[in-house]
Image (cartoon, grey):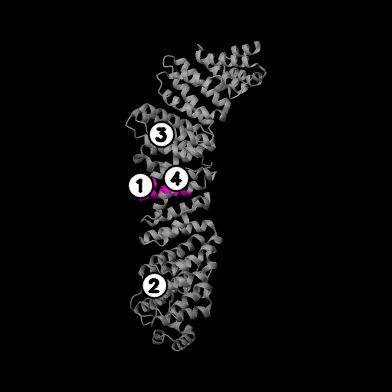
Amino acid sequence: AVVVNRLVEVLRTPSAAVQKAVANCFPGLAPSLEAEARAELLAKLLDMTLNGTKYADRRGGGIGLAGAVKGVGFAALKANGIMDKLKEAVEDEKNPPAREGALLAFECLCERLGRLFEPYVTKILPILLICFGDVNAQVRDATDLAAKAIMANLSAQGVKLVLPALLKGLEEKKWGTKVGAVQLLAAMAYCAPKQLSTCLPTIVPRLSEVLNDTHPKVQRASTIALEQVGAVIRNPEVLQLVPSLLGAITRPNDNTKACLDTLLDTVFVNTVDAASLALIVPVLNRALRERTTELKKKAAKIVGNMSSLINDPKDMVPYVPLLLPELKKVLLDPSPEVRAIAARALGALVEGMGEASFPDLLPWLFAMLQADTSNVERAGAALGLSEVVAVLGMARLEEMLPEILAGCRAASVTSRDGHLLLLRYLATTLGADYQTHLAAILPPILDGLADENEAVRDAAMGAGRQMVETYAFTSMDMLLPAIEDGIAGQNWRIRHSSVELLGNLLFRIAGTTGNVRLDGGSDDEGASTEAQGRAIVDKLGLARRNKVLATVYMARSDIQITVRNTSVHVWKSVVSNTPKTLREILPTLIERVIDTLAADGDDHRTSA
C-alpha cells in the first residue's frame, strides 16, 4: 500500500514520461492488491483526475486511472461507477477543471484500453459534441485530444457505429452541434489506416457540403476539418498540393482548373494513400461533371493516371460509386477526344483494381453498344469496351468474340453499328495480338459494307480502314484475298468499298496518302512515283502486284460510276506510267478478263 500511495503522489510530477512510467506499473501491481485496496486506488486516481488543482495533477490522474483500470480489469469501470462519475463531471457547468479532467480521462482510457473501450464510445460522442463548443479553452483542447484518441483506436465496426451518428449531427439546426459534429469527423482523420480508407470517402464529401452552411463558424470548422484531413496525408507529392486541393474543394468555380493543371504537372514518385484520395477524388468528381470539355479531359486523364499510383486497390473501392457514373457520362461525350481519354481511364481503372471491382461495367458497355441512342454514344461504348477488353487479355476476347461477331450481323441496326465500331477500336487497343482473328473478323466487316443503313456502312468502312492501317505490313496474306473477294462481289456497294480499301492498302505500302486527285486529262501520267511503284512490287511480289493492278484496272469499267471513279483515283495514285504498267500486267489482265466473262454475275461480264 505504501508503494502504491507513493506512486500515486509521483503522478503529480509535470512530466508525461514520468506519469506514463508510473501508470505502466499499475497493471502489474493491481492484481496483488486486495479488493478494498483496488477500489481505494481507483477512487484516489479518479479524485485526482477531477479535483486536481493543477493541470499536471489532472493529467497524471487520468493516465494513472487508465493504467489502474487495465490492471484491475475492464469491468471496474462499471463496478466502481467510474464512467457515471466522469459523465457527471463533464456536465458540471460550474467546474471547468473537472470537465477538463473527465475529458483527459476519456482520452487516457481510450489510449490504454484500446478497443476494449469501444462500447463506451457511442455514449461519449454526445458529450464530445457539446464540449467542442465549451466556453473554456482548456476544455475545448481536452475535447480535441479525447476525440483524436477515440478515433485512432476505433475498429472497422466502431467506425460503422460512430459515423452515422456524426453525419446526423451535421443535419442538426443548432450550429453548435454542427460544429461539434464537424470537429469529430475531422478527428476521424486520425483513425488507423485501414479504418481511414473506409470512413474518408464518406466524410470529405459531407464536409464539403457543410462549407456552404449559413453560419460562419460552421464554415470555418469545415475548412479546418478538411485541413486536418490534409495533414494526415503521407504522400509527399500530394502533401504539397493540399492547399490547391482544398482551394478547389472550397471554391470549385475559381480553382478547379488550376488544381487539375497542378495535378497533371506533378511527377508522382510515391504511391497515393487513402487520405490523398479523399481530397483528390472530390475535385475530379466535380470536374467530370463540368460542361467544359477541357476540364472533363483533364479530370479523366488524372483518373486514369491515378489508377497506377494506388498501392492498395482497396483504397480506391469506396470511390468507385462516386467516379464511375461520371466517367460513364464522359465516355458518351460528343467530343471524340474526351471519349478517347475517358475510355483509357476506364481501362486503367479495371487494370488497377481488377474486373471484380466493376461487376456491372461490361454488361453496361454491351448494352450501350447496341442502344437505340446516338451513334456518338455507341462509339463511346465501343471505345470503352475496347480498352477494357485490352486490359482483360486475349483469352477474354476469345470468349466474347462469337457474341461480337453475331452482333455485327444482328437484325438491329444499332447493334450492327455498335459491334462494327467495336471491331474497329479493338484493332487500335490490341495491336498485333488481334490479327490472329482477322480471318473471322473480315467477313462481317465486308458484309457491313453492303448494309442498307448508311451508319452501318460507315462503321464497316471505318473498321476496314483500321484493319488496313494497322495490319497492312503484317497480315497482307489475310487482308488482300478478303478485299479481292469483295471487289469480285455482286453488290456494288461492297465492290466500291473494297476498291477503296484496296487503295488504302496500296497507299500504305507505297508510303503515300492517296489524297491527290487528278481529274480529267490523260491516263498516261499518274500522281505516283517509280519509287512508290517499286515499294509495292517489293512488298507484294511482281505476280501479285500484277494481279492487284489488273483488278483495279478492270474495276475502272464497272457499271457503277462510283466504283469506276474510285478505281480511277486508285490507279492514278499508285501508277506513275499507265502505258508501261499495262504492258507489264497485260497477260494477267487478259486472264482476268477471260475468267470474268465466264463468271455468273451480269455486272462483271458487262464490265469485262
User: Pointer 4: residues within 10 angstroms few (<14), some, or many (20+)?
Assistant: some
SS at mark 1 in the image: loop
User: Pointer 2: residues within 10 angstroms few (<14), some, or many (20+)?
Assistant: some
- How far apart, in angstroms, are the residues tagged by discs 4 and 2? 44 Å
Under mark 2, the amino acid is: Asp
Which numbered disc, 4 or 2, marks the residue that appears first in the sequence? 4
Report which residue position mark 3 lands on. Answer: 168
Q: Is residue 522 above or below residue 367?
A: below
Which numbered disc, 1 or 3, marks the residue that appears first in the sequence? 3
Report which residue position mark 4 lands on. Answer: 264
Residue 271 location, x and y as percent? 53, 42
Magenta-span inclusion, residue 299: yes
Which mark lies nearer to you, 1 or 3?
3
Report which residue position mark 2 lands on. Answer: 451
- How far apart, in angstroms, are the residues tagged by discs 1 and 3? 29 Å
Q: Main secondary structure of the magenta part?
A: helix
SS at mark 3 in the image: helix
Q: Which segment is the magenta one?
A: 287-304
Residue 244 location, x and y as percent? 41, 37
Disc assigned to residue 290: 1
- How far apart, in angstroms, are the residues tagged by discs 2 and 3? 59 Å
